Amino acid sequence: MHQYKGKLILHTGSMFSGKTSSLWKDLNRFEIAKYETVVFKPKFDNRYADKEIVTHDNNKMRAIPVENIDEIIEYMKTSTASIIGIDEVQFIKGDINNIVETLNLFLENEFTVVLAGLDMDFKAEPFELVKELMPRADYLYKHHAVCANCGVDAWVSYRKTHDDERIKLGAAESYEPLCRKCYYEKEKIRKQMENQLSMLED
């Protein structure tokens, strides 16, 4: 594991693609190798547990809930861990440049940083932080779920409900993975329905 000192490992992709499972596997391997790890997660993401990351196949690991990058900085001032994990990194609050600079500082000081995060929102728009981190990663893994409609590799997380806010917690009841073709087809149908409803209201 020594070769990962000062390296940034990023797992990204759509929902249900195995990002958190891959984060868990990496961190578990470091722990088996007797490296001290610390894991952070966004405080508001309590879908499965408040102080754990939980994979879809129910593997668990203790995690520290934080609001923003400043809380991670403060914690690491007294931590003896050499491996830093962050799940759902796209939801960590703070100025993007400050977050990138902070992660770079950890890497310069030979911490290993393992991240998992969505690359795009439900409208297929990139999450700005992950977009900045992808080219900076030493090891970048783009994971794919299975398209819920046709079975090929999924491309994006499609929101099944009709609300429009960008950040909305949910799992299979609210989202499904879709390939590019199926996503555009469903979006076309959705827009047609919205136009018809609008015409009826007028």
Image: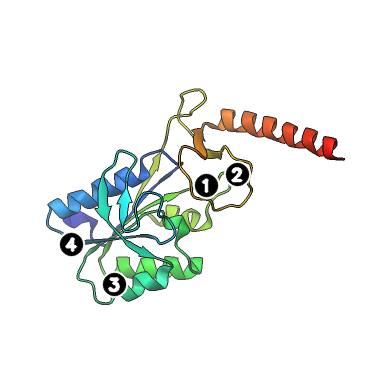
The tag on residue 76 is 3
Question: What type is the residue that disc 4 sits on?
Answer: Glu
Q: CA distance from mark 2 to mark 3?
A: 35 Å
The three-letter amino acid code for the residue at tag 1 is Met
Q: CA distance from mark 2 to mark 1?
A: 8 Å
| Residue 136 percent across, percent down from the top left | 41, 57
Q: Nearer the viewer, residue 56 or 77?
A: 56
Circle 2 sits on which residue?
A: 123
Q: Nearer the viewer, residue 90 or 110?
A: 90
User: Marks 1 and 2: in contact by CB < 8 Å?
Assistant: yes
Q: Residue at x 40, y 54 (%)?
A: 46
Q: Could you tell whether 49 is left or right of 188 in the image?
A: left
- Asked whether residue 156 is in view, the answer is no
17 is higher (above) or lower (below) than 121: above
The location of residue 189, given as percent across then percent down, is 68, 30
Give above or below for 179 relative to 61.
Answer: above
Work out which quarter of the rendered image holds the C terminus and state it.
top right
Q: Which residue is mark 1?
A: 120
